[in-house]
Amino acid sequence: MNPAVLLTDGLDPVVIAAAALLPSWRSTVRGPDDILEAIDLLPDVRAVLLSTTDPTLLRAAVERSRLRHIPVLLACGDETARRRAVALRIEEWYTPPATPEEIASRVRSALSRMAVSGAELAERVEKVAYEEMLYDPLTGAAALPLMIERMRSLIRERGELAIFYLEFVRSGKIEEIYGWEKLDGVLETTMAAVREFFDSSAFHPVRTMTSFIHDDDIIVFHVPPREEGPAAAGNIVAGAARLQHQVRSRLQAVHGEDIAELFDMYVGHAQVYDTPKLRLERVIYRGVRDAANAARSVEQRERARRVADLKQVLHERSVYIDYHPILRADTGAIFGYEALARGVLRSLRSPEVMFDVAAEADLLWELGRLCRSRALEGMRGRLRGDQLLFVNADPHDFTDPAFELDSVDPQRVVIEITERTAITNYPKFREMLRTFRERGYRFAVDDAGRGYAGLGSIANLEPDFIKLDISLINSIDTNFIKQNLVETLVGFATEQGAMVIAEGIERPEELETVKRLGVPLVQGFLFNRPERTTHPGLADSPPEQPGAPGATDHAPDRPQRSREEPLDQRD
Amino acid sequence: MNTEHALPILVVDDNHDSTEIVRHLLEARGYRVFVAYNGDEALEVFERVRPALVLLDVMMPGRSGWDVCRIMKQHPQHGRKVRIMMLTARTAWDDKQAALTTGADDFVTKPLSLVELAARVERNLALIERAS
């Protein structure tokens, strides 16, 4: 038998000595130009030891070694190399200088790791992974192939099957705003509501199965019983509105109004017939595709309708404003209000949806102007003492030649910069900020700590207020990493001379935690319901007592939450 | 022995010295400790003993700590219950963000301060106790 080859990319005497320590091994050295070819073609290579710092070469070497089931070892001179090794899942590494003995033992360990991954251990892990593929871990919903298997005999017996595709739009938006933990919760609630709907309706549970597809859309299979005509299945389509309503109200009860309003669902339907000539799986997959397309065309129609709705909103100035109180964490006194515009039309109730539609129809400037001017109008005479008004503006708004804030009292207004669109022209943007600052306006940046955005870009805008991203506040009382991040942000804000606002506070535990971390200002549904202006077609409601619950013409039938009556913890 | 100490803890690190030190520290405090030296092994032990708390090294050959954390947190039965502490050499902003997206609950910076490590283990177990 030929000796095993330790292929290496550098002429390192220690590595050569290490190969000599391994019985019936030898080393072969290849330069950076030839190493990849050697990995592919050189016979008897059993391990590759690299010292390269070139990430591209390293990646290619690892990929090619994997194809031949050869373990890779990396000499990691620094932290960067080690991080690279982790990212590439390299089998083994060491920190030079190392003795030949250590390197030899690392080679053995890399080989054993490679051997183990083929063995029983990996098989068991794979089995777990396989089971995870068959069931959605979040809701336990079966995957499509499993559904087909389970329903096969029923379908054969009946000869047909109804497929319903429930398409959810904006689930990505929920995740973007509130974080993945929230979306997980929303999907669980959604699935439970969908199941409940089918269980309580005429659809016999045995004959109806639900599955997740593409992570958030839901497919429902229904095989009508023998005694029913095929038309009965069409009931679901007729019931789609009822289903949508049921899911929405459940979401509102569990996750609050803002999330419920972001939720949109479109139902598409396809009828599939089983014939012996065609493979059932194929027919079903085609049916799923047809149902999905049908759902999408409903969505397209709805979008067009919403653009028309938005034009009407702009024409009639029919947005109303929710004033969300911002409180001092220590005393609970109202520090100010954030103005959030909502469409009067049901389809545009959610500000996120309204601005999405405006972006699509290229009406962002117009909508921004309307919302800001109504926010200022509605607040006239409402602010007490030194309370402030927070008004949202997107960087895109600042490119509007007609951008203006027409406040009689700029010292009372904070412009909250929400980055729906990225800032493209930084110098010009800063120049705009400066002119407004000179007139007395103050600034807040939204969503600090979201994703990988560094603190540098926040510092650049020299804000007076920094709003923490909602995803950081959700369950902060049990997550120590979030606590640490918020602590860092509070320290950073203090250095910048800015005040931190924690928004999205829903539970007393979350409030206690952010208070302990030194956050001075808080906002969220744990506190009072927002105050509202009435329908803009009518006169604005008279000024109310600050802190008192607002007008209730749009308020949902949900109990009001106040600081005196802390929320029950819902889990 | 106190019952709270009977909660199983899984320590995962490819460095044997490091796992031995941590095992010693935690066992001396009455905890039940299981050890794994790589990601696959950790998942296997996880499946078997359903630990209440996992101390997970980020930098491991093969499957990284981030991957292992994500898989554990997605476990259909036990994913919601387990708390995971990442052991990381750096605690840069990005690392913490990465930790959040994998579902980790806490982190400790390496090189480990044993006093701090013990305190963190305790505060995580206290939360588990409260939740159950």
Image (cartoon, coloured by chain):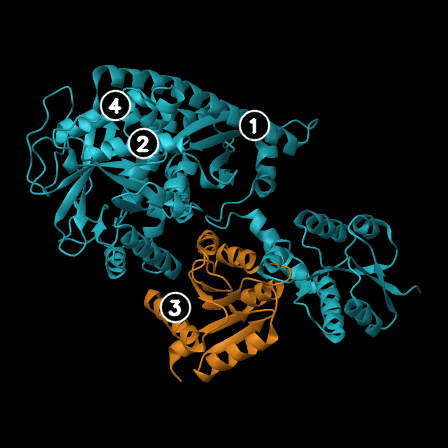
Chain colours: A cyan, B orange
Separation of disc 4 and disc 3 at Cα? 49 Å
Category of crowding for the residue at label 3, using alpha-carbon neighbours closer than 10 angstroms: few (below 14), some (14–19), many (at least 20): many
Quadrant of the image occupied by residue A558: top left
Tell me: A475 left or right of A122: left
Give coordinates of residue A229: x percent, y percent: 48, 24
Separation of disc 1 and disc 4 at Cα? 42 Å
Residue at which label 2 appears? A431
- Which of the two discs, 1 and 4, sits closer to the camera? 4
Kind of residue sitting beneath label 1: Arg
- Element type where label 3 sits in the image: helix
- Element type where label 4 sits in the image: helix
Q: Label 3: chain?
A: B
Dot 1 or dot 4: first in sequence order is 1
In this view, the residue in front, A388 or A472, is A388
Give coordinates of residue A140: x percent, y percent: 49, 49
Residue at which label 1 appears? A289
Contact between labelled residues 4 and 2, with CB atoms less than 8 Å apart: no
- Which of the two discs, 4 and 3, sits closer to the camera? 4
Q: Label 2: chain?
A: A
Give coordinates of residue A246: x percent, y percent: 33, 35
Residue at which label 4 appears? A369
Contact between labelled residues 4 and 1, with CB atoms less than 8 Å apart: no
